[in-house]
Image: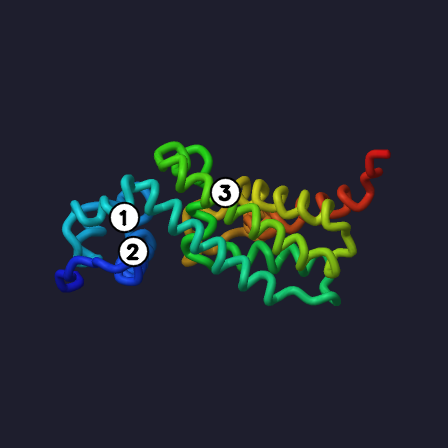
Amino acid sequence: MSPALHRARTQDQKHFRRQQILDAAKTHFEAVGYESFSMANLAKLAGVAKGTLYLYFATREEVFLALYGQALLRWSDVFINCLHTKMSDREYCQTLHNSAMADDGFVPLLVRLEHLIEHNVSFEHLIQTKRLFAARIKLIAQASVPVLGLTHAQATNLVKAMGVLLIGVSGADQGPSLQDEIVPDDVQSFIDSFASENIFVTNACFIINGIRAAVPNS
């Protein structure tokens, strides 16, 4: 638990305090997950009174929305920095999947974003975050254009489709661990075919080819 903090008075102090809370929230979320995340425990970890916590985040979901915004920035920077023009479609899709799954917060929050998190946040915070999402989609699309040989409009549609596909495959790796078992080859092959990376990359490549082949509206 962090020591009790003095009241933040200036805007810089408030910004710093908010980030301290989000740093504690990230640690708490990675330790306990979405369902067990507690505002009371977050206040203890951040070293603030629970009432003070609600001055910065009116609901638990506002904390998650802010965490997702940070995760989106973090992941997209990593992904864009990995891109180069000699990548194949498959390498592009593998890089997108693996970098997203490697971030402990990005996909777990993305999965819950529209049907849980965004339903209990202020309109102001929702609009701010939607603008952040739009800006990041634009940036990722711009970086993808020279890699995949798409137009900006095509790349924008692709990035949106990749997000939906990530949500769809996110639960594919949740089966029981068979690490210490001797699994027959045919069964192991069948299990591997349902791994999230395999499903994502295969279908993402189909999507890229479909976008390339689509005839633009005249």
Regarding residue 24, the answer to whether it shows in the image is no
How far across and down, in percent of the image, does residue 83 sit? 65, 64
How far across and down, in percent of the image, does residue 45 sit? 20, 57
| Apparent side of residue 191 relative to residue 84 in the rendered image (left or right) | left
| Apparent side of residue 112 relative to residue 85 in the rendered image (left or right) | left
Sequence-first disc among 2 and 1 = 2
Residue type, numbered disc 1: Tyr
Q: What residue is pinned by disc 2? A: 18
Residue at image position (52%, 47%) is: 133
Sequence-first disc among 2 and 3 = 2
Other residues around mark 2 within 10 Å, as few (<14) / some (14–19) / many (≥20): some
Judge whether 39 appears above or below 8 on screen: above
Which mark identifies residue 30?
Answer: none
Residue at image position (30%, 62%) is: 12
Other residues around mark 1 within 10 Å, as few (<14) / some (14–19) / many (≥20): some
| Apparent side of residue 178 relative to residue 88 in the rendered image (left or right) | left
How far across and down, in percent of the image, does residue 206 sit? 72, 45
Alpha carbon of mark 2 to alpha carbon of mark 3: how far? Answer: 20 Å
Residue type, numbered disc 2: Arg
Q: What residue is pinned by disc 1? A: 56
Query: Which quadrant: the N terminus?
Result: bottom left
